[in-house]
Structures are given as C-alpha cells and as structure tokens.
Amino acid sequence: MRDRTLEELWRAATPSTARFDAGKVAHLPPSAQRYFRHALAPGARCSASARLEMHGTIKLADAWRPFTAMQVLCWDRGFVWHAHTSIKGLPISGADVELDGVGAMRWKLLGIIPVVHAEGPEVSRSAIGRLHAEAVWLPAALLGPEVSWSEGPRGPAFTVDAHGEQTHVELDTDADGRLRAMKLARWGDVGTGGFRYVDFGGSCTADREFDGVTIPTEYRIGWYFGSDRFECEGEFFRCTIDSLVHR
C-alpha cells in the first residue's frame, strides 16, 4: 500500500534544471572538493529531491527483522519514510515523517492497531537531524548557502543551519572522495529515557551511480557510533538502496 503523504510530497517536488560544474566547489576545502567530484559527475542534475527504494533489516524488540521501504526526500521540506516489516509473522507498516519542521512516527499492526505513535518538539528535532544526515543522498543540496564546509578528522565536515536546527556532520572519505562513514550528534532519547545529543552515524560499504550522482548504497546505522556501544546496543538499521530517482 502506498503512503499518501509520501506521494503528495513527491508530486510537489520541483524538478531541478541546474547542472554540476566542478567550478562550483573550487572554493571548498580539498577533501570536500574530492567528495563532490566523486558524488557528482560533470553535468549531473543538481537535485534537491529524490525518491528511494530500499530493503534491509531493522532491530525491533531486540531482534533483527527484514523490511522493505520507500522514501521521498525533499531538501526544502523534509522526508517521508514508509516501510513494511513483521513481528511474529504479523505485518507492521508505518512511516517516519519530518515535514516543514514537524516530525512524527506512526506505525500500525495489521494496518489497524497502533503500535507506535510519537510526535512533538523532541521528535521533530531528532527527525531534522536525520534529514541533515541523509542529505548525502542529495549531495548537490549540500552546496547551498545554509551549509558550510571544513576539514574534519577523517575527511570533510559540514555544518547545516536549516529547518530550525543546526547539525555538524563529519564524513570519513577515502583518497578519491568516496564516503566510508559519517558521524553527527543527533537529538534522541536513547538509553536514559530523556532527550539529549547522542553520537549517531554509520558505515557505508558500497556506492552506486544513479544518472551521474553517486551515493552510498549499503549502510549500518545506529546510536553511539564510533564507540564500543555501537556494536552491542546502538546499531539498529542495516539497509541497501535498490533504486533512486532524483528530481
């Protein structure tokens, strides 16, 4: 079943007519220049929206469960991630949403019985951090005036001041600019039951080109990234991106 909010967001996305030129990044730190030259081929569409399909496993109730999902990501407005999984053979579907600064999580068992419903300022703040991190699926959006670049410990780093939140993201890239990992402080209520900034991120083990735009396509993601706690309690999401259409 398709998600109405996801479809509406995609229909409203304005196609980009701008094209990438390496001269656009000549003023950036060297590692950032390598990142963009790997991510964007000359003449690639400088898209600010994308539609993705993915599959993987997600950790729910202390067990890894397979899922399939579709996501629409629009840099100026937010995202809708609609997924399907199951617990004990019973189907669960729902969506994580952040639109125009408002975030929510809504999940139902059998499409009827609510099992997760979360919203409010804290949820919105956490969802905006996710949006900023997932901008690596829209690399051209990271060339906007609301993003500043610097040299990080293992590659480029960027700071986004947009959507009502400021986020600093460190990228780990190889000598060619290929993304291997990312890390940020994201607002969340992990571990203590109270919201605070927690290290968040993950590793990227493969990438793929989609019409001149190269993005990581295999991820391991979770809280406490960069520490021993990631493996034992923080990691909760593993995915492969199967298709991507930029607009």
Image (cartoon, helix red, strand yellow):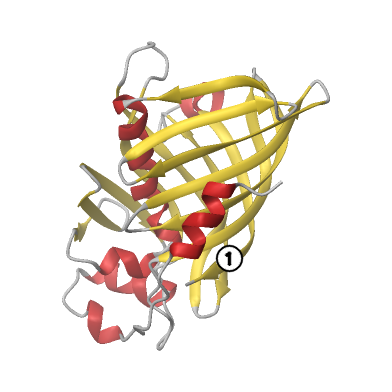
Q: Position of residue 160 (x, y in %)?
A: 23, 52
Judging from the image, what secondary structure is the residue with disc 1 in? Answer: strand
Q: Is residue 184 left or right of residue 164?
A: right
Q: Is residue 101 above or below residue 8?
A: above
Q: Is residue 118 left or right of residue 68?
A: left
| Residue 208 picture quarter | bottom right
Q: Position of residue 96 (x, y in %)?
A: 50, 37
Q: Position of residue 241 (x, y in %)?
A: 62, 57
Q: Nearer the viewer, residue 102 or 241?
A: 102
- Residue pictured at 24% horizontal, 86% vertical: 23
| Amino acid type shown at disc 1 | Leu
Q: Nearer the viewer, residue 196 or 48?
A: 48
- Residue pictured at 62% horizontal, 20% vertical: 114
Residue position marked by numbered label 1 in the rendering? 244
Q: Is residue 82 above or below residue 73?
A: above
Q: Is residue 246 above or below residue 8?
A: below
- Residue pictured at 56% horizontal, 73% vertical: 209
Q: Nearer the viewer, residue 45 or 58?
A: 45
| Residue 32 picture quarter | bottom left
Q: Is residue 26 above or below residue 231?
A: below
| Residue 22 picture quarter | bottom left
Q: Is residue 119 left or right of residue 208?
A: left
Q: Position of residue 135 (x, y in %)?
A: 38, 56
Mark 1 closeness class: few <14, some 14–19, many ≥20 residues within 10 Å: many
Q: Nearer the viewer, residue 26 or 118?
A: 118
